[in-house]
Amino acid sequence: MQKLIAAIALAFLSQPAFAEEAPKWSIAIHGGAGTLDPDTMTPERRAEYEAALQVALDAGAKVLAEGGSAMDAVKAAIIPMEDSPLFNAGRGAVFTWDGTNELDSSIMDGRDRSAGAVAGVKTVRNPILLADTVRTQSEHVMLMGAGAEAFAAEKGFAVTPPEYFATPARAEALERMKARKLSALDVDHKFGTVGAVALDQNGNLAAGTSTGGMTGKRWGRVGDAPVIGAGTYADNRACAVSATGWGEYFLRVGVAHEICARLRATNEAKAAMAEGDETAKPVERDEAQYIADAVMADVKSLGGDGGVILVTPEGHAIFSFNTTGMYRGRATSAGVSEVAIFGGEATASVTTDH
Ligand code: ASP
């Protein structure tokens, strides 16, 4: 017993008097929002989604825990979801009216607000990587269709055959939509776009989003996912946001930029009013949640639905959705690592992450 007490005392004394705070990191991911009901999803299906979300979350968290950049973490998390047929991005993308799969993606670095995006690409396995190449190796922000594919070829991307992206479940959804004259929302009841937002140990933020769009889209329709400011935005002064939902409404509200702008304005107002008060804090978790909820309420007031994920410079990983569920997950340096699907589950109610 005495030995034990001595060992505990030694362990305690060997700690530095003022342990330095470990650098923070944080990541949140989504795999789409929508009408998700635990009573209509089989336990097997639920386990499949949770496992796929965990793989993506772990891939991103590993990058951050090892000191990698937020940009690399966002790509690491999105790639497995683009590769999984479960989500509406990359393989498993929804079908256009003409029976093709057309992919949209965007990515943004909060450090310098550099951004890249592609729309309507058909032969690039991981559109998030092409979006990032537009960001780093072109003087443009957004490329579309055949031009984006020519750029991909020039930068050494392999041409992936269109059949790779097509899955029977998505083909059936298009058939059902046509047969019953349904809208994209009636046929799916959910959005399967994928996205990730991250804060790295150096305090940099990044956001990325990737999607096949909406079932039965026509005439070269492009939603919010590849549009910087609508589906994706990152600014180190505010937050990083990725959205999923009925893209037309997210475009009209400019959701991702709107959330960042409100957060930045709140930060600036707090700093100005604090005037040297050292106890003054930047935007706190509940304030960021309030801002995200307010913007999502605005989307709803126009008739749109969906959700967002965001990470703040303080490492708060936040979800907001006005649907019954959202495939989602978050992990932080404080030891949080969780995935969830339905409203009311862990991540919807947990109020601390750091
Ligand atoms: N936001 C996407 C779009 O409108 C769809 C989704 O979130 O699944 O293209």
Image: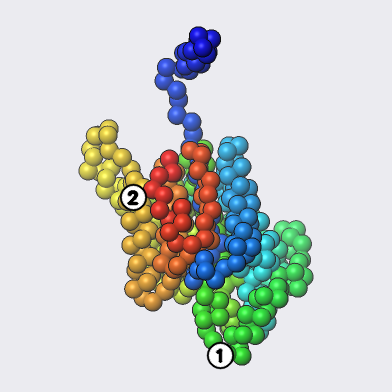
Q: Nearer the viewer, residue 213 or 153?
A: 213
Sequence order check, earlier mark of 2 and 1: 1
**To which residue does mark 1 refer?**
181
Q: What's the residue at 76%, 66% (across, down)?
A: 159
Residue 36 image point, x, y percent: 51, 68
Q: Secondary structure at mark 1?
A: loop
Q: Residues within 10 Å of mark 2 (few under 14, many from 20)?
A: few
Q: Is residue 83 visible?
A: yes
Quarter of the rendering containing residue 116 = bottom right
Residue 15 image point, x, y percent: 48, 17
Q: What's the residue at 48%, 31% (across, down)?
A: 22
- Whether 187 is drawn above or below 307: the answer is below
Q: Residue furthest front?
A: 1
Q: What's the residue at 70%, 73% (across, down)?
A: 167
Residue 354 is labelled as: none
Residue 220 image point, x, y percent: 59, 79
Q: Secondary structure at mark 2?
A: helix
* Distance (Cα) linking label 2 and label 1: 43 Å
Horizontal arrangement in the rendering, residue 66 relative to residue 290 (left or right): right
* Cβ at disc 1 under 8 Å from ligand 1: no
Q: Residues within 10 Å of mark 1 (few under 14, many from 20)?
A: few
Please name the amino acid that badge 2 sits on.
Answer: Asp
Please name the amino acid that badge 1 sits on.
Answer: Lys
Horizontal arrangement in the rendering, residue 105 relative to residue 353 (left or right): right
**To which residue does mark 2 refer?**
286
Q: Quadrant of the C terminus?
A: top left
- Whether 92 is drawn above or below 181: the answer is above
Q: Is residue 235 visible?
A: no
Horizontal arrangement in the rendering, residue 87 relative to residue 329 (left or right): right
Q: What's the residue at 44%, 68% (across, down)?
A: 323
